[in-house]
Image (cartoon, rainbow, N blue to C red):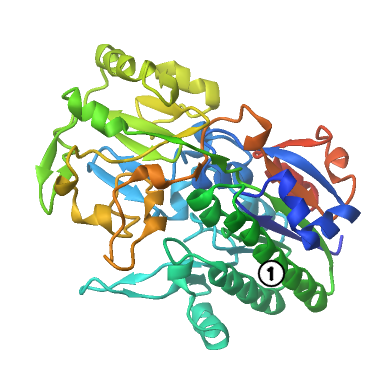
């Protein structure tokens, strides 16, 4: 079959959003669409791994958007390489069939087995500045992309300056890669809808503007690829998750500290002492992993009781209860907290704002022991972010219980789901892997 498959991974895209995206709607009108149900935890790294491996975190090991390495007492947020994925991915399986893959910007793609790769990898200089750069495979590719498209606009990829410029660079550079490498499978991550929906809410005017901006880019991409390739192109669009409105925030680390389980030390403010804390929480949108110094069932139950009646906490999973969502992996915390659908969890652990560490007021996704969407509210006058987690209006990550937590799957080919034996109108994230493989 002389066909290329382009899989666009678009977090935050909902079925109802098609009404604001005429170009994507035109694609669906000749193909098909379905509701896509992300598996818990419904956040970037685990869902991308689900789609690429066809399995859940209990097998591939991606349990959050970061890891706590117990042997070194270190937190790793957003920097891991592909080796952390413990199962073969679509491009590995396609290579066995003699097919070439390209991978553009999914977070765990550094060092992956695809023939062509591009993702952000800024160089952190000794003076605290960053040199804009991307990890590419082949290594020389970024120099070619730089000459044609300029540096990747990293500061427009996440944080207070996040805007359509980063997705535009991704699209335009992907067109260059399509023309040069002619991949059989191309996986492209487009994060643009994430920003406005978290900052202002998924139904805000800002979020609707983001839909229209992205839709215009998609039209550019559809037309550009059709002009370049001499193959039939199957377009697949998969939303990693839907963002829902939130009006409440929980602070698990403050609860643990007040109960005497979490200790801190002084550096430039208070830092969590991972070596001396009996328990602490790595938070990630609408869930958190609580890691215990000693895996004691008695202590785990004692801590679980602290949260079972906490406002905003919907489920507390201990021990074998983690099997319910397929997140029973050694990298998971001994306890997992899951938010109610209208709430999310902040990593804050200080009780007085003057004791917050310097990184708390900066855009610093690597040193924070958890995800911090308040970075979207950076104050350019004070050159800092506020320490007010109630500003956040949208979140995701909790298990899907309602339609508004489901994403969208779209295909340019009608009947694709039924041909692969899937239930009409509904798809699980981990089923995307087999759906892609079926096309080859």
Name the residue rendered at 51%, 56% in the picture. 195
In the depicted structure, whether residue 135 falls above or below residue 366 = below
In the depicted structure, whether residue 193 falls above or below residue 144 = above
Residue 145 lies, in percent from the top left, at 55, 81
Residue 67 in the figure: left or right of residue 395? left
Residues 64 and 12: in front is 12
Name the residue rendered at 85%, 59% in the picture. 26
Residue 357 in the figure: left or right of residue 187? left
Is any part of residue 261 visible from this angle?
no
Name the residue rendered at 49%, 43% in the picture. 86
Residues 354 and 284: in front is 354
Q: Which residue is mark 1?
A: 217
Residue 338 lies, in percent from the top left, at 45, 28
Residue 170 lies, in percent from the top left, at 59, 70
Residue sticking out furthest to the bottom: 147
Quadrant of the rendered structure where residue 383 is? bottom left
Local SS, label 1: helix
Quadrant of the rendered structure where residue 277 is? top left
Residue sticking out furthest to the left: 266
Residue 293 lies, in percent from the top left, at 22, 28
In the depicted structure, whether residue 262 falls above or below residue 156 = above
In the depicted structure, whether residue 201 falls above or below residue 234 = above
Is any part of residue 35 visible from this angle?
yes
Q: Quadrant of the N terminus?
A: bottom right
């Amino acid at each position: 079959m002389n066909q290329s498959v382009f899989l666009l991974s678009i977090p935050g895209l909902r079925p109802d959003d098609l009404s604001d995206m005429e170009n994507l709607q035109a694609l669906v009108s000749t193909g098909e669409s379905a509701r896509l149900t992300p598996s818990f935890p419904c956040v970037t790294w685990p869902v991308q791994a689900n789609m690429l491996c066809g399995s859940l975190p209990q097998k591939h090991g991606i349990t959050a958007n970061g890891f706590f390495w117990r042997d070194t007492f270190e937190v790793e947020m957003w920097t891991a390489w592909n080796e952390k994925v413990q199962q073969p991915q679509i491009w590995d399986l396609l290579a066995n069939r003699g097919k070439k893959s390209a991978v553009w910007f999914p977070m765990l793609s550094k060092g992956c087995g695809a023939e062509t790769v591009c993702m952000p990898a800024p160089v952190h200089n000794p003076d605290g500045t960053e040199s804009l750069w991307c990890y590419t495979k082949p290594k020389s590719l970024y120099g070619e992309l730089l000459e044609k498209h300029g540096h990747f606009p990293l500061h427009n990829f996440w944080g207070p300056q996040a805007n359509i410029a980063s997705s535009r660079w991704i699209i335009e550079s992907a067109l260059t890669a399509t023309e040069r490498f002619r991949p059989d499978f191309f996986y492209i991550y487009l994060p643009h809808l994430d920003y406005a929906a978290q900052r202002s809410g998924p139904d805000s005017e800002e979020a609707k503007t983001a839909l229209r901006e992205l839709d215009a880019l998609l039209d550019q991409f559809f037309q550009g690829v059709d002009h370049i390739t001499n193959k039939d192109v199957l377009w697949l669009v998969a939303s990693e998750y839907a963002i829902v409105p939130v009006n409440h925030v929980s602070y698990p680390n403050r609860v643990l500290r007040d109960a005497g389980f979490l200790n801190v030390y002084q550096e430039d403010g208070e830092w969590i002492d991972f070596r001396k804390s009996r328990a602490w929480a790595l938070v990630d949108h609408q869930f958190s992993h609580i890691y215990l110094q000693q895996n004691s069932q008695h202590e785990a139950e004692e801590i679980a009781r602290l949260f079972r009646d906490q406002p905003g906490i919907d489920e507390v999973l201990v021990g074998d209860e983690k099997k319910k969502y397929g997140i029973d992996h050694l990298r998971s915390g001994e306890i997992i907290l899951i938010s109610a659908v209208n709430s999310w969890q902040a990593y804050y652990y200080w009780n007085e704002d003057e004791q917050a560490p310097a990184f708390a007021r900066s855009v610093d996704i690597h040193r924070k022991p958890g995800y911090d969407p308040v970075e979207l509210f950076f104050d350019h006058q004070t050159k800092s972010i506020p320490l007010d987690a109630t500003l956040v209006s949208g979140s995701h990550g909790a298990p899907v219980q309602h339609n508004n937590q489901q994403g969208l799957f779209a295909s340019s080919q009608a009947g694709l789901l039924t041909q692969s034996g899937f239930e009409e109108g509904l798809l699980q994230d981990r089923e995307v892997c087999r759906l892609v493989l079926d096309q080859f």
